[in-house]
Amino acid sequence: MSERTRRGPVESADGPQRSAGTGDIRVLVVEDEPLLAEAHKAYTERVPGFVVVGVAHTAREAMAALRHRGGADVDLVLLDFRLPDLPGLDVCRALRAAGSSVDVLAVTSARDLAVVRTAVSLGVTHYLLKPFTFAAFRDKLERYAEYRRQALAEGEVAAQHEVDRMFATLRGAARHTLPKGLDEQTLHTVLAALGDGGPLSANEVSQRTGISRVTARRYLEYLVSADRAVRAPRYGTPGRPEVEYRPV
């Protein structure tokens, strides 16, 4: 690990990225859409302990970056499966055929079950469907970081439950739970209202869902805190500007 962190940044299509520090998880972003690539890079570097060391927009650029000094400068690849020159699954196959053990987190809109099954068989660590919220993205990275911490520990597992814990860390359901007093069914109702007619005020959500205005505001503010909605002032009405919400 110490040898890896002393090395410089990986060269990429976007030029050298900032260097990783000791213990950082080094990430290569592979995404053909420049705006999405920049967004994924920004999301990654909002999560403590992760640093983007390269950005590639094609499979060829990704493979070149991973061949850089044997690919030892990359720990995790955020891989879009729909690349202009080669499918992401073929990139995974090429990596495994070359003996690379780099971890892959699929960030894709591909919903075909056959693609998902193939991704699992090729050792893809996580599969994140577009579009997604920052909270969902952060959860995947945090789970991966904890799994990696356990996987890099020296020695042997003492019992089956330790193996089970490692797999649960990697594959388990999202850990984020709702604050006390909020429930999933009402949350989905509020989200559906926003999706059907956003941006909406708390009063408008109340009218559409049948819950009180105060309750609607609680759910809306929770969605903002979870990066699943944004709030903004609504001008053009008498008096103070009303606050409206729209889904991310």
Image (cartoon, rainbow, N blue to C red):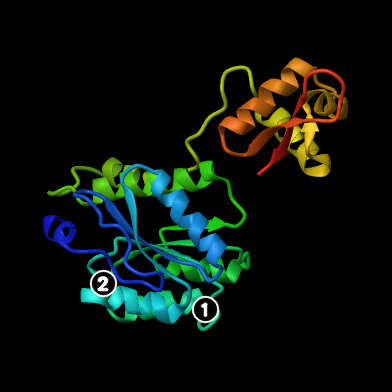
Kindly identify the amino acid type of the residue bearing the numbered disc 1. Answer: Pro
Label 1 sits on residue = 87
Q: Which corner quadrant holds the C terminus?
A: top right
Q: Residue at x 64, y 22 (%)?
A: 182
Q: Which mark is residue 62?
A: none
- Say whether residue 29 is left or right of residue 147: right
User: How far is mark 2 from mark 1, CA to CA?
Assistant: 20 Å
Q: Is residue 248 above or below residue 111?
A: above
Q: x, y (%) of residue 31? A: 50, 68
* Residue 172, placed above or below residue 71: above
Q: Is residue 95 above or below residue 245?
A: below
Residue positioned 15% across, 49% down in the render: 156
Residue type indicated by callout 2: Gly
Instruction: Examine the rendered structure and indicate whether residue 37 appears above or below residue 160.
Output: below
Residue 171, position as x, y percentages in the image: 44, 49
Instruction: Quickly name the residue at label 2.
Output: 71
Residue depicted at 36% across the width and 71% down the height:
12
In the visual, does 26 lie left or right of 247?
left
Front one among 196 and 239: 239
